[in-house]
Image: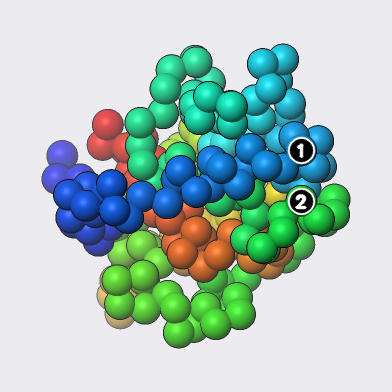
């Protein structure tokens, strides 16, 4: 089997690890989350309040639970989540991108699927180091549409009738993503499009959207390569 494709973020994260104490924003978001009533967070994000005061979210076919008073994040099995990016994106979603997330109202359905570049200022943000990581998916699944669908289904996705293979995936309670594969032909190489729900910017800043895209792409590749 060919080597597992790498993502640009894989090269960026080791550098971030070196100075994590200086750049780690998670303590700030844990503090903000602790200052918002759990009922307000649940109302705005679709989270479920657990008996120990945590907030449980459906995430990629499983659950992630954050307990603000303990600053603890666990997966569906109750094991600690040690992935920096995953914990950060979940905190961003729970806190909300607005300065006063406690004032958020109940959230609307995800709405139609759009390119991340169609989000406000997305066409300028998602460039260079923040490019949406579609190329690794095309490299990994370009000649394997069946495997592409299996990977999506393993994370709770359902088939979608676009391209040569596609699926839609409810990543978070109010965030849906769509993945479309076009296999290579005589004229064009394989390619993948990633679409997001048009209301995603109610929950995540653009760097949060980029982080979420990277998390999901890495999980899809893991389903193929282990």
What label sits on residue 102 in the rendered view? 2
Which element type, helix, strand or loop, lies under badge 2?
helix
Quadrant for residue 170, please give it.
top right
Whichever of callouts 2 and 1 sits on the residue coming sooner in the sequence is 1
Scheme by which the image is coloured:
rainbow
Residue 34, position in %: x, y?
A: 63, 37
- What residue is drawn where x is 46% and y is 43%? 27
Which residue does the numbered mark 1 point to in the structure image?
37
Query: Is disc 2 surrounded by few (<14), some (14 to 19) or many (20+) residues within 10 Å?
Result: many
Quadrant for residue 225, please give it.
top left
Q: In this view of the protein, which residue sits in the foreground, 32 or 140?
A: 32
Labels 2 and 1 touching (C-beta < 8 A): yes
- What residue is drawn where x is 73% and y is 26%? 49
Quadrant for residue 211, please give it.
bottom left
What is the C-alpha distance between the residues marked 2 and 1?
7 Å
Q: In this view of the protein, which residue sits in the foreground, 21 or 158?
A: 21
Is 101 placed left or right of 190 in the picture?
Answer: right
């Amino acid at each position: 089997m060919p080597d597992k494709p790498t993502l640009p973020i894989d090269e960026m994260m080791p550098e971030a690890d070196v100075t994590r104490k200086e750049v780690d924003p998670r303590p700030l978001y844990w503090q903000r989350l602790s200052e918002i009533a759990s009922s307000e967070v649940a109302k705005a994000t679709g989270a479920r309040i657990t008996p120990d005061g945590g907030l449980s979210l459906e995430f990629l076919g499983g659950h992630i639970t954050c307990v603000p008073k303990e600053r603890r994040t666990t997966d569906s099995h109750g094991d600690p989540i040690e992935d920096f990016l995953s914990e950060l994106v979940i905190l961003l979603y729970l806190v909300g991108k607005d300065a006063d997330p406690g004032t958020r109202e109940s959230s609307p359905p995800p709405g139609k699927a759009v390119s991340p570049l169609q989000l406000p200022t997305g066409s300028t943000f998602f460039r260079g180091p923040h490019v949406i990581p579609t190329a690794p998916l095309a490299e990994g699944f370009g000649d394997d549409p069946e495997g592409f669908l299996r990977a999506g289904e393993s994370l709770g996705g359902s088939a979608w009738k676009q391209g040569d293979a596609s699926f839609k995936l409810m990543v978070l309670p109010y965030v849906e993503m769509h993945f479309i594969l076009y296999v290579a032909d005589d004229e064009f190489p394989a390619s993948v499009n990633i679409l997001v729900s048009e209301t995603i910017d109610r929950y995540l800043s653009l760097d949060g959207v980029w982080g979420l895209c990277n998390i999901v792409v890495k999980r899809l590749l893991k389903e193929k390569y282990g």
